[in-house]
């Protein structure tokens, strides 16, 4: 799975510790034996306390044996209560069903991307670990040849796949690195994940 889900992070200019990070793992607990769980976390603010929040979210994801993105997010929200909180996105990719289920809290950008369009999955307002109103799981189809892109607000949302026509021909690692290079902001921590080839 690691070759099909890749991510990159970058610390704010002059920063020592990145408050953004990501994690991915296989999940065979549901009806889809090949499912992959992917999480992106942006700890509130910058520096060591943001990093602690992000590492706490990663541990909570790895400790969970199954469940929908909504259920996993509930566990992450509870784990983050002892931290400053974070924006968090959780996606469950189900290759045999050609779909992705998603639950997000805070300022995260998640989209299914083809060579000509990107279909956004909405995040709910709030801060995981602090205040959330209600959680909702959204589902989108994964067209053949598409990619799932997830990134923090350390990247501009203004990029469009038409400006990067050859991008989807590359590996997830190259896609993530190129997006960080072209859309990343120097005044914020940044993280981007790309997933493709599972479906």
Image: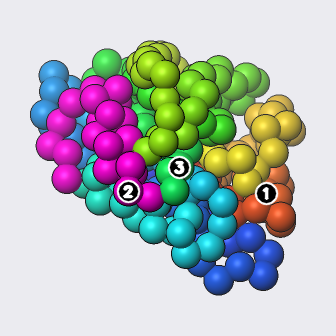
Residue depicted at 81% across the width and 34% down the height: 160
| Drawn side of residue 67 relative to residue 87, left or right | left
- Element type at mark 1: loop
Distance between the alpha carbons at the discs numbered 2 and 1: 30 Å
Callout 2 crowding tier (Cα within 10 Å): few <14, some 14–19, many ≥20: few
Q: Which mark is residue 55?
A: none
Above or below 135: residue 186:
below
> What separation in Å lies between label 1 and label 3 (alpha carbons)?
19 Å
Neighbour tally class for label 3: few under 14, some 14-19, many 20 plus, Cα within 10 Å: many
Image mark for residue 184: 1
Which residue, given by chain and number where applicable, does mark 3 sit on?
Answer: 86
Residue 13 in percent (x, y) is at 80, 75
Q: Earlier in the sequence, mark 2 or mark 1?
A: 2
> Splitting the image into 4 quarters, where does residue 124 fall?
top right
- Give the residues drawn in magenta, as a range: 63-83
Sequence-first disc among 1 and 3: 3
- Which of the pair 188/81 is nearer the observer? 81
Report the residue marked by disc 2: 82
Q: Residues within 10 Å of mark 1 (few under 14, many from 20)?
A: many
Asked where in the image residue 43 lies, by quadrant, the reply is bottom right
SS at circle 2 = helix
Residue at image coords 32%, 50%? 79
Mark 3 or mark 2: which is in front? 2
Q: Are marks 2 and 1 in contact (CB under 8 Å)?
A: no
Answer whether residue 157 is visible to the viewer in this image: yes
In magenta segment, residue 111: no
Q: Position of residue 40 (x, y in %)?
A: 50, 49
Secondary-structure class at tag 3:
strand
Snapshot colouring:
rainbow
Left or right placement of residue 27 versus residue 150 in this view: left
């Amino acid at each position: 799975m690691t070759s099909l889900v890749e991510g990159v992070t970058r610390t704010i200019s002059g920063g020592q510790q990145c408050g953004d990070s990501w994690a991915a793992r296989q999940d065979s607990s549901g009806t889809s034996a090949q499912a992959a769980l992917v999480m992106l976390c942006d700890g509130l603010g910058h520096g060591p306390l943001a990093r602690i929040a992000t590492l706490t979210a990663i541990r909570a994801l790895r400790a969970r044996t199954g469940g929908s993105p909504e259920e996993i997010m509930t566990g992450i929200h509870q784990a983050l209560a002892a931290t400053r909180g974070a924006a968090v996105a959780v996606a469950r990719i189900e290759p045999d069903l050609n779909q992705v289920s998603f639950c997000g809290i805070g300022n995260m950008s998640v989209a299914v991307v083809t060579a000509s369009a990107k279909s956004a999955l909405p995040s709910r307002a709030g801060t995981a670990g602090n205040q959330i109103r209600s959680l909702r799981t959204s589902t989108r189809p994964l067209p053949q040849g598409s990619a799932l892109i997830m990134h923090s607000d350390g990247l501009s949302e203004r990029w469009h796949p038409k400006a990067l026509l050859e991008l989807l021909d590359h590996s997830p690692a190259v896609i993530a690195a190129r997006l960080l290079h072209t859309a990343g902001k120097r005044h914020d921590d940044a993280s981007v994940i790309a997933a493709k080839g599972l479906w």
